Amino acid sequence: MSAAPIQLIRHCRGAWRLRRAPGQLQQLQRLLDAHSFWASGRSQRELSRMLTGSQAVISAWQGSRLVGFGRATSDGVFRAVLWDVVVAGEHQGRGLGRRIVEALLQAPALQGVERTYLMTTNSAGFYEQLGFTAVDSQQLMLRRSSSTNVKH
Ligand SMILES: CC(C)(COP(=O)(O)OP(=O)(O)OC[C@H]1O[C@@H](n2cnc3c(N)ncnc32)[C@H](O)[C@@H]1OP(=O)(O)O)[C@@H](O)C(=O)NCCC(=O)NCCS
């Protein structure tokens, strides 16, 4: 029996369905906990705020199961940043990550934006295939907040 097809959903502003439909936020939490080191341990309340503050959100579903996710923030003109692109382990290496990034780049909030950035620890080769290039001329600067329980 062949596996059910994977459907991508481009969420409308605020990602209401992902935040409010029963069990969906829990599935997002589990996906991030299981397949990302930087986004594990986020509470559902934090994830809901994160979705509200994202201008582009893509989720990937096989039936009722969340198997992929990605989001972006954007000012709509000059700068956008991709965040939290994750594919469930058994679906990795089959082109789903590419589909999610392409859908993010095609989202209205990213259309025509001058520069789109991302940070990656070990997936640079994946993003190079999607048109991103490593930048040597700039430094990544980070200021950690002591007022939240965010770890990474
Ligand atoms: C990185 C990730 C999103 C890629 O998704 P995926 O569905 O496995 O990737 P795809 O199948 O769409 O791969 C597209 C291409 O990129 C390549 N690729 C995938 N992951 C790669 C990696 N880590 N490094 C280099 N190349 C990679 C694939 O080989 C494929 O090349 P091909 O078209 O020549 O076959 C996924 O592996 C993942 O969720 N990893 C864990 C979380 C993570 O590290 N996310 C990155 C956040 S910055």
Image: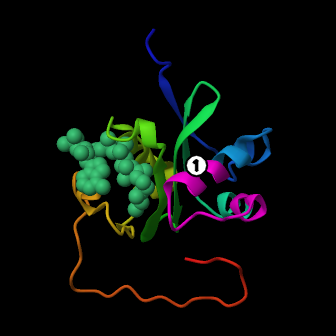
Magenta span covers which residues?
Answer: 29-48
Q: Is residue 117 visible?
A: yes
Which residue is at the front of the view, 83 or 104?
83
Q: Is residue 24 magenta?
A: no
Density class for disc 1 (Cα within 10 Å; few <14, some 14-19, many ≥20) is many
Vertically, is 89 above or below 145? above
User: In the rendered view, does 115 fall on the left or right side of 55?
Assistant: left
Kindly identify the residue that appears in the image at 79 percent across and 45 percent down: 20
Quick check: 82 above or below 62? Answer: below
Q: Is residue 92 above or below residue 73?
A: above
Residue 138 coordinates in the image, percent (x, y): 28, 86
**Residue 105 appears anywhere in the view:** no
Quadrant of the rendering where the C terminus is positioned: bottom right
Residue 24 in the image: state x and y as whole percent.
Answer: 71, 42
At a point 39% along the width and 70% down the height, the residue shown is 119
Q: Quadrant of residue 147 in the image?
A: bottom right
Residue at left 37%, top 85%? 140
Q: Is residue 79 left or right of residue 152?
A: left
Q: What is the chief secondary structure element of the magenta stretch?
A: helix
Q: Is mark 1 within 8 Å of ligand 1?
A: no
Query: Dividing the picture into quarters, in which one does residue 82 lie?
Result: bottom left
**Amino acid type at image mark 1:** Leu
The residue at which mark 1 appears reads as: 31
Report the front residue among 129 and 30.
30
Q: Residue at 48%, 88% (x, y): give it.
A: 142
Q: Residue 71: x percent and y percent?
A: 53, 55
SS for callout 1: helix
Residue 49 on image: x %, y % = 73, 63
Residue farthest to the top, as pictured: 1
Magenta span contains residue 41: yes
Say which of 1 and 15 sits in front: 1
